Image (tube, rainbow, N blue to C red):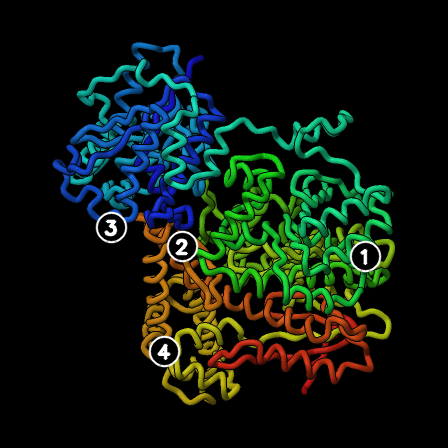
């Protein structure tokens, strides 16, 4: 079936502008949105192979909707000048591809698309129509011949809406979405809708009454008028008076001189490369597997072993180049000395032999050879002998640039869901072969410099790679006998709890079934549902937070909460741990990820030891499984109130800084200030409220969230917050200042330059904008906390990494855990404490609390 793609150009350009980092040509022109739009255009052309292509644009003049309603889209901020100039350039790109550009004064792009779709359906019913858009307003056009390909996140992920997808998401037909939107309104377009009618109620009304016109007797007179008016604004006008010749939209991709010239002028070399046919990694690998010999094809993989390792090393020295790639999916390593001939290192067979290791290790430490590649930590884990001192390697890192492009990809866009090499290579360079890595490196390093990320990359993240490799190699010992005993204990506890729960419930049921639990709580035991939240499906929630509200309502509820905690701990730690223990050394080797969070914090998996329970009834039992090696003790160094100290310092709040410098309980001090009482008169509830708000600041907590967290009424919460910001005015000013900076720049930046792009920071949708504002404040605090922690890890490793007495084994939130020789605890603890407390000059100071012991569940305070 022939395929026509209709492009909602304005929506896509706006999305590209907010989703991508700034991009500037040699002439100083901003073209980031043009690049994003062009990249998406090429992706759609190559993947969907359209027979016809049309691009619709909005016009700057008011439309018929503005004439009907002066407030239509009135709340939107003016289009930034550096975005406005890019619309013209996008049109030039489209014309270079011979794609018709359509616009009509008085109408929006949506109307043009609706009119064309209607015309083609009548005249050419055999043509499949796909609408490419950045929003969902066009879903009302979907039918058996028309679908909408909408951008899901940024400009790289899409979702196709056909009749089935719309039914699944909205439980409505496409034509009913106009009436649905007329009732709920649309804040992004300033369409009012009927006050008090939300999505769930609107769906029910449309399913019951049909069109808004049928709701006259149900709605109040004024509500009915507003609904009709909102529908008029919402409905796409499919009768736009314009000529359209389908043949002029016929499309066939030809890389013309015009395309080459405009991409050359814009500096879009990578997009130009994507227009050329590329052999995929899969195809190349298939050729390798078929046993083809060297026939001039690039990326032909050959095994690297004793017979050819010396030749490889000689080439690496001659070229001053060593490229290392880790394929996470296949768990395979590839190396190249010339960026053209690639060799496979199989860590599981004889090709990864002792001679290979002995020759590659010196290459890594050769200052004349540039070491770079993709995901280098797994390679370092293999190449570095377990427990080998890494201080010499870190010394080398001080003098060299060690470039891991996966880390760079993350720093440039820390909000990505995944960092897949093939996807990033294809998007950034247009290539799907490893030769594209050299192009990618040049692009990435230019962007690192442009965004001011050099310090973060070279001084914070790069030295950390071998440190994490060394931590993973070391691992942590597990008391397997105690683990087995605990498994039995948990089984018995679980069985006992279930028996008590079934007795109170008056019979057996499945505690893991939300439906059965609700039946027991609300029907059998008649517990009140008042105050409980509902799920997105409109059902009463029995999530943990909601059950906590019922804790005093019936004895069964605390037992259910305890059962859930036990079940979670059992499935997270007790059950999987035996399979994760390395049989060679009886230790668990958790994996640490640098690219796992948007703020710069580390994450871990297999198992996730960063989520070890700390304050629950069973936390000591779980933690005690992990024990120090013979002759060693654990020493844990936990930054005290790190995030609060950071926000106090960034805000330059004198009261809070003074409290920290005096080592006061910060929550008691804040409570005393707000309640105007002496410190000794602060009650437990006062402190709890102050603590909830102190931490809530960082995470963007609102009035309701604060009231719930502090266990107070909404009115008390409002009064408390008002007093808080009056007493600590520096914090209020800082938070607003940082939000404004994020709105202006489209990103949040830490003191050291780490960035997080916030494409929704200026969104007309309040919920998206508020979330982006929360992320902005959170990034400034958590991002700096991450930088401080990583700088401390680097400095400690530089000073103590060559020792056989001290091993860093865990990083958990604001805490570092070391294994230290039992007879060397005192001197090494003093060194580590000094480094951590002086790694960064924070106005409120850095303070570390220290504990030590022979297992993680039995740590005692240490005073130095």
Q: Earlier in the sequence, mark 1 or mark 3?
A: 3
Q: CA distance from mark 1 to mark 3?
A: 62 Å
Q: Earlier in the sequence, mark 4 or mark 1?
A: 1
Q: From the viewer's perspective, is the residue at label 3 or at label 2 nearer?
A: 3
Residue 403 location, x and y as percent?
61, 54
Residue beneath label 2, please?
Answer: 771
Q: Earlier in the sequence, mark 4 or mark 2?
A: 4
Residue at position x 50%, y 32% from top?
274
Residue 242 location, x and y as percent?
19, 20
Mark 4: give few (<14), some (14-19) or many (20+) Cα within 10 Å. Answer: some
Q: Is residue 489 visible?
A: no
Q: Work out which quarter of the rendered image holds the C terminus and state it.
A: bottom right
Q: Which mark is residue 728?
A: 4
Q: Work out which quarter of the rendered image holds the N terminus and state it.
A: top left
Q: Secondary structure at mark 4?
A: loop
Q: CA distance from mark 3 to mark 2?
A: 18 Å
Residue 745 location, x and y as percent?
35, 57
Q: Secondary structure at mark 2?
A: helix
Q: Using residue 233 as the reference point, say whether residue 661 is left or right of it.
A: right
Q: Using residue 82 as the reference point, say whether residue 828 is left or right of it.
A: right
Residue beneath label 3, please?
Answer: 77
Residue at position x 79%, y 56% from top?
487
> Toward which corner of the image does residue 670 lie, by quadrant?
bottom left
> Toward which corner of the image does residue 402 lie, by quadrant?
bottom right
Q: Is residue 222 visible?
A: yes
Mark 2: give few (<14), some (14-19) or many (20+) Cα within 10 Å. Answer: some
């Amino acid at each position: 079936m022939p395929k026509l793609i209709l492009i909602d150009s304005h929506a896509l350009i706006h999305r590209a502008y907010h989703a991508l980092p700034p991009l500037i040509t040699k002439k100083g022109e901003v073209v980031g949105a043009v690049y994003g739009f062009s990249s998406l255009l090429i992706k759609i052309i190559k993947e969907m192979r359209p027979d016809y292509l049309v691009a619709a644009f909005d016009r700057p003049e008011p439309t018929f909707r503005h004439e009907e309603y002066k407030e239509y889209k009135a709340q939107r901020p003016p289009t930034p000048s550096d975005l406005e100039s890019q619309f013209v350039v996008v049109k030039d790109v489209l014309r270079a591809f011979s794609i018709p550009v359509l616009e009509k004064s008085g109408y929006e792009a949506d109307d043009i698309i609706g009119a064309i779709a209607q015309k083609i359906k009548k005249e050419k019913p055999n043509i499949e129509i796909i609408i490419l858009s950045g929003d969902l307003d066009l879903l009302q056009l979907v039918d058996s011949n028309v679908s909408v390909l909408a951008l899901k996140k940024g400009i790289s992920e899409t979702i196709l809406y056909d009749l089935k997808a719309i039914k699944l998401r909205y439980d409505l037909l496409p034509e009913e979405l106009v009436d649905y939107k007329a009732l709920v309104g649309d804040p992004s377009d300033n369409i009012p809708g009927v006050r008090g009618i939300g999505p769930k109620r609107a769906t029910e009304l449309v399913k019951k009454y049909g069109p808004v016109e049928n709701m006259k007797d149900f709605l109040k007179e004024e509500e009915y008028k507003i609904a009709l008016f909102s529908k008029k604004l919402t409905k796409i006008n499919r009768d736009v008076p314009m000529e359209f010749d389908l043949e002029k939209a016929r499309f066939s991709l030809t890389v013309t001189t015009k395309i080459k010239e405009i991409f050359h002028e814009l500096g879009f070399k990578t997009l130009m490369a994507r227009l050329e046919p590329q052999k995929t990694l899969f195809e190349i690998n298939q050729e390798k597997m078929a046993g083809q010999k060297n026939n001039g094809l690039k990326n032909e993989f050959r095994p690297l072993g004793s017979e050819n390792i010396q030749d490889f090393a000689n080439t690496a020295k001659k070229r001053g180049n060593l490229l290392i790639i880790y394929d996470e999916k296949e768990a395979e390593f590839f190396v190249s000395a010339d960026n053209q001939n690639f060799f496979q290192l199989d860590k599981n067979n004889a090709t990864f032999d002792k001679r290979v290791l002995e020759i590659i290790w010196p290459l890594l430490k050769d200052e004349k050879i540039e070491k770079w590649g993709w995901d280098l930590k797994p390679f370092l884990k293999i190449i570095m002998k377990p427990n080998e001192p890494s201080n010499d390697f870190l010394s080398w890192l001080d003098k060299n640039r060690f470039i891991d492009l996966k880390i760079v990809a993350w720093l440039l866009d820390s909000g990505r869901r995944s960092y897949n090499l093939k996807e990033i290579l294809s998007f950034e360079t247009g290539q799907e072969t490893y030769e594209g890595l050299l192009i990618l490196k040049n692009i990435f390093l230019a962007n690192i410099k442009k965004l001011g990320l050099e310090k973060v990359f070279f001084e914070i993240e790069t030295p950390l790679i071998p440190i994490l490799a060394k931590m993973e190699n070391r691992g942590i010992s597990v008391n397997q006998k105690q683990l087995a005993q605990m498994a039995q204990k948990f089984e018995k506890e679980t069985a006992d709890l279930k028996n008590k729960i079934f007795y109170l419930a008056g019979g057996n049921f499945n505690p893991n079934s939300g439906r059965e639990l609700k039946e027991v709580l609300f029907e059998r035991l008649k517990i009140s549902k008042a105050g409980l939240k509902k799920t997105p499906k409109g059902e009463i929630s029995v999530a943990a937070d909601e059950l906590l509200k019922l804790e005093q309502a019936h004895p069964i509820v605390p037992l259910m909460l305890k059962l859930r905690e036990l079940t979670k701990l059992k499935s997270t730690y007790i059950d999987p741990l035996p399979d994760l223990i390395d049989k060679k050394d009886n230790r668990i080797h958790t994996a640490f990820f640098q690219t796992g969070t948007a703020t710069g914090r580390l994450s871990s998996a297999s198992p996730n030891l960063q989520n070890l329970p700390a304050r629950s009834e069973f936390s000591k039992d779980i933690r005690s499984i992990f024990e120090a090696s013979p002759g060693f003790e654990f020493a844990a160094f936990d930054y005290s109130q790190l995030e609060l100290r950071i926000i106090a310092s960034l805000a330059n709040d004198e009261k809070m800084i003074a409290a920290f410098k005096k080592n006061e309980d910060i929550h008691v001090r804040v409570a005393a200030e707000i309640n105007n009482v002496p410190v000794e008169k602060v009650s437990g509830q006062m402190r709890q409220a102050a603590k909830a708000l102190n931490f809530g600041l960082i995470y963007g907590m609102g009035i309701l969230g604060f009231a719930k967290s502090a266990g107070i009424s909404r009115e008390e919460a409002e009064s408390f917050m008002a007093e808080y910001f009056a007493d600590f005015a520096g914090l209020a000013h800082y938070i607003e200042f940082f939000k404004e900076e994020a709105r202006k720049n489209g990103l949040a930046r830490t003191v050291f330059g780490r960035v997080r792009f916030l494409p929704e920071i200026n969104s007309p949708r309040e919920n998206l904008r508020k979330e982006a504002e929360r992320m902005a404040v959170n990034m400034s605090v958590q991002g700096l906390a991450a930088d401080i922690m990583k700088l401390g890890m680097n400095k400690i490793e530089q000073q103590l990494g060559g020792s056989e007495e001290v091993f860093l084994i865990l990083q958990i939130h604001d805490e570092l855990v070391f294994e230290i020789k039992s007879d060397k605890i005192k001197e090494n603890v003093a060194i580590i404490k000094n480094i951590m407390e002086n790694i960064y000059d924070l106005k409120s100071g850095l303070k570390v609390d220290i504990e030590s012991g022979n297992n993680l569940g039995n740590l005692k305070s240490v005073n130095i």
